[in-house]
Image: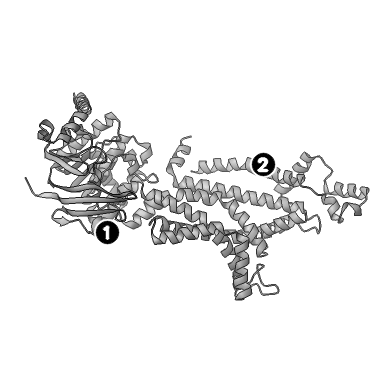
Amino acid sequence: MSISVIEIRGLCVDYALASGVLRAVDDVSFTLSRQEVLGIAGESGSGKSSIALALLGLLDSTDSRTRGSVDFDGQSLIGLDEAGWRGIRGRRIGAVFQSPRECFNPTMTIGQHFEDALREHFGLSRQLATTRTLEALERVRMPRAREVIGSYAFELSGGMCQRAALALALVLEPAVLIADEPTASLDLLAQVDIARLLAELRTELGLAMLVISHDLGLIGRLADRVAIMHKGRIVETGPTVQVFREPTDAYTRELLAACRPASTRSSMSGTGATA
Amino acid sequence: MLRFIATRIAGVVPQLLLVSLLAFGIVKAAPGDPVASLAGGVEFMSAADHARVSHNLGLDQPLPVQYGRWLARMLQGDWGSSLKDGRPVFEVVARALGYSLLLVGIVWTLIIVTGIVLGYLAGSAPESRRDTVISGFAALSFAVPPFWLGLMLIVVFSVGLGLLPASGSARIGGSGSLIDRAAHLVLPVATLLLTQLGPYIRLVRSSVRDTLSAGFVRAARARGLSRRTLVRRYILPNALTPFITWAGLSLPLLISGAFVVEWVFSWPGLGRLFLQSAMSREYPFLMGCVVVVCTLVIAGNLLADCLVAALNPKLRRSHAGE
């Protein structure tokens, strides 16, 4: 395996709650290699999203505490200052989240989001930004891209919003893309669309991806390796095919059994759409 | 956008008519005989004189006729004259309005600036010491009645320290210099500002808190945008929408607060004129004040509507699509 872009060792994330301390992530370690797709699967509340937030330095320091080491490209992200984070967030590590419509500022057009990002990271003028935006939107096969630039998120469907969010993450040419529940809030057809798009982008761009989802169908389709999370810990990890076929951990077996109807459904609609 | 504003302005016309009707109606329904009070009481006037004066003033006509005439004259800028000393209402009300606009305008501007700044400082660091101090101040501002604070400020700064004038808009017999006028404004402005600021701070604080936890702010931070861009383009435009609505809608509160403050500091504005006219049953002045104050309130709402629409594309687009 090639050199790793992300290396996490003994990551713990604690949240201070009124009732005490909640350990959301408990001694988690994994690496992500170049061009690799790692799936992190688990039920909601298993600590998956906290890992994404820790990787982006977005955990609120007033009510949470992070321990362990998080390295990106050999550089430690722990204790980075705000200016240091700005060079990482978006530019080196891109992210898309669930509920894509809510990820766009309702007072700005889709195009203005691209403008802000391209101006701050690359110092691009408005005109150059528009050219780049169009390219990025076409890369995610956005229909009527020119129109979308002047639209607001509330005027687009959920699937189109997620496409736009993906384009917005990719326009900054990150080395790693974190997809945190990228299909969770979408309708079934849009889920299939976005999953296929992610698979295509992955082969086209050779992007390293961290796909965080409770949807084992999505993970099975995209991920080379999978880490199964339960109550903040990684209970099993390995090549996706192997883990799905011969799970060794009891929780993994339980999860696979629970997801079977969902995973057969998504693979069926997937083949239906390709045919 | 222009169409949206035009629709809103068209909607204002019936509101204004209703206001004029109310102003007319309320004053007509008020107790007391204005004709008799001219002579100092009904016992000082013969029935014939009473009828003659009533006729001259048009007070013997049916109410709809009185209203129609009154409205027509109002629209021409002829607002009648004082029942007692013949001063023209339009000019007196206009002068008072000037003073009120000066006071309320300054306070409104200060409230908007300090409300946004303090509310943002509190809301962006919830439960911090900074938040506790600012929120405490906001609660205090809610609780303190303006007449009490006004009197206390007079006691301390005018009577005690002799630093600032306690009443009026300029020194009597003075040159009316800018400094003198500004000195007369300090205490009324301070009283009104300190007693009105609370809700504005609270509103900005809570909507900044809400906006900070919104998905698009997290997503924007995840894109590595600078703090400046985040605050100016993502947080404030969204957090200030309810504030702008409230800044427009709360204009009546500010104006009624100004009534009390004008009274305490003998500030020659609409509030003082209104209260004086109410006490001496000067109906023309009362009606003039009511119409002007209501128009201000409607204008405040209109302004807020248009600003919110300018900031909120959802509203703007849905109206453009009509």
The answer, for residue B201, to whether it is visible in the render is: yes
Secondary-structure class at tag 1: helix
- What residue is shown at x 67% (from left), y 57% (from top)? B271
Query: Within the image, what quadrant is residue A135 found in?
Result: top left
Residue B175 at x, y = what percent? 66, 74
Residue at numbered disc 2: B18
Q: Nearer the viewer, mark 1 or mark 2?
A: 1
Position of B232 with respect to A247 (left or right) is right
Residue A95 at x, y = what percent? 24, 45
Position of A15 with respect to B140 (left or right) is left
The three-letter code of the residue at mark 1 reads: Glu
- What residue is shown at x 18% (from left), y 29% (from top)? A257
Position of A141 with respect to B1 (left or right) is left
Q: What residue occupies the far left of the structure in this picture? A: A1
Residue B240, compared with residue B168, is above or below; it is: above
Secondary-structure class at tag 2: helix
Residue at numbered disc 1: A82
- What residue is shown at x 26% (from left), y 32% (from top)? A191
Residue B257 at x, y = what percent? 61, 56
Q: Chain of mark 2?
A: B
Same chain check for tags 1 and 2? no
Residue B98 at x, y = what percent? 64, 60
Q: Quadrant of the C terminus of chain A?
A: top left
Residue A227, compared with residue A4, is above or below; it is: above
Residue A240, compared with residue B74, is above or below; it is: above
Q: Nearer the viewer, residue B28 or A264?
A: A264
